[in-house]
Image (cartoon, helix red, strand yellow):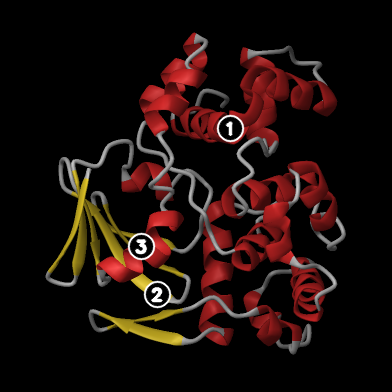
Amino acid sequence: MRVYEKDNCVILEDMTDFLPSHTFDCGQCFRWEMIDEETYVGVAFGKVIKVNFDSKNIVLANTTISEYENIWRDYFNIDNDYALIKNALSTDDTLKNAINFGWGIRILNQDVFECLISFIISTQNAIPRIKKIVAKLSMLFGEKVEYNGNDYYTFPTAQKLASLSLEDLEPLKAGYRAAYILDAAKKVASGEVDLYSLFDMTTSDAKKELLKIKGVGPKVADCVLLFSLKKYDAFPIDVWIGRVMKKFYLDENATMKQIEACSKEKFKNLGGFAQQYLFYYARENKLLD
């Protein structure tokens, strides 16, 4: 793959295993908006960027090669060899089909605090509503950034959210989750929970730290581990994944512990990748309706 800068864009020439629709619509992130087929605009790390796939190249607009090296290379998980990952996971027909269907999924390395708050908001919530709440939160308490004549908003800091009250969050219509947002922000802002120290912990220890935060259960913790902390052995289990595992690998009476044990035994340290392929495949093909 060749990477170069041209006309305020960074081009990833002959980029494989990356399709915007697969990556941005697989349930791992909530700040990306589809402009047209395989063109998305999103906000991450205080920057607005447009991503387009044009048959064989990924074009990152409104950025520089310096920003690519400092932000987007890691954010888009460019250095992970997805061909090797897919080969290692292609151990049964279900996974082979899921990988072939969602071939362009890449697990993003999102900001830890934004990921934490986003998945607290996701609890018992549908993706369109999650996106709406996250967008409103950013518009009210983030910083405005203009791009192509449109206004975008950065995700608010922990310090900003920690200074707010429940009344301040009422416009979000986040319900009981508002209290969890404030609890998380205050724990992070005060240093009671040091999110950035979690990178150096084992998956198990990092998960224990995350579970100290109100509103963070095993599924939310695993999402944060997988989508922002590079703990690729994390295997978030929601209703969809529970049903996928029961249908294809266990049986209808399988318990949560049995599902967790099966995922560890079958997918080992690549559980997070398997989870994303299976989730996207089952949801998009309505295999569990």
Give the residue number, with chain letter if any, for mark 3: 69
Per the rendering, the mark at residue 81 is none
Q: Position of residue 87 (x, y in %)?
A: 43, 19
Q: Is disc 3 placed on a helix, strand or loop?
A: helix
Of discs 1 and 3, which sits in the foreground?
3
Image-quadrant location for residue 8: bottom left
Closer-to-camera residue (27/155): 155
The residue lying at 67 percent from left, 49 percent from top is 225
The residue type indicated by label 2 comes to Lys
Three-letter amino acid code at disc 1? Gln
Task: Say above or below: 154 vs 133.
Answer: below
Label 3–label 2 contact, CB within 8 A: no
Describe residue 15's horizontal placement relative to residue 284 as left or right: left
**Residue indicated by mark 1:** 275
Mark 3 against mark 2, which lies toward the viewer? 3
Seen at 69% across and 18% down, the residue is 246
Q: Is residue 249 left or right of residue 26?
A: right
Q: Is residue 42 visible?
A: no
Give the quarter of the figure containing the N terminus.
top left
Against 267, is 220 above or below? below
Of callouts 1 and 3, which one flags the residue occurring earlier in the amino acid sequence?
3
Q: Confirm whether residue 269 shows in the render.
A: yes
Please give the label number shown on residue 47: 2
Sequence-earlier tag: 3 or 2: 2
The percent coordinates of residue 49 (x first, y second) are: 32, 68
Q: Amino acid at mark 3?
A: Glu
- Residue 245, x across and y down, in percent: 66, 21
Q: Is residue 145 left or right of residue 276?
A: left
Whole-angstrom CA distance, mark 3 to mark 2, is 14 Å
Quarter of the image where the C terminus is located: top right
Instruction: Label 2, secondary structure: give it.
Output: strand
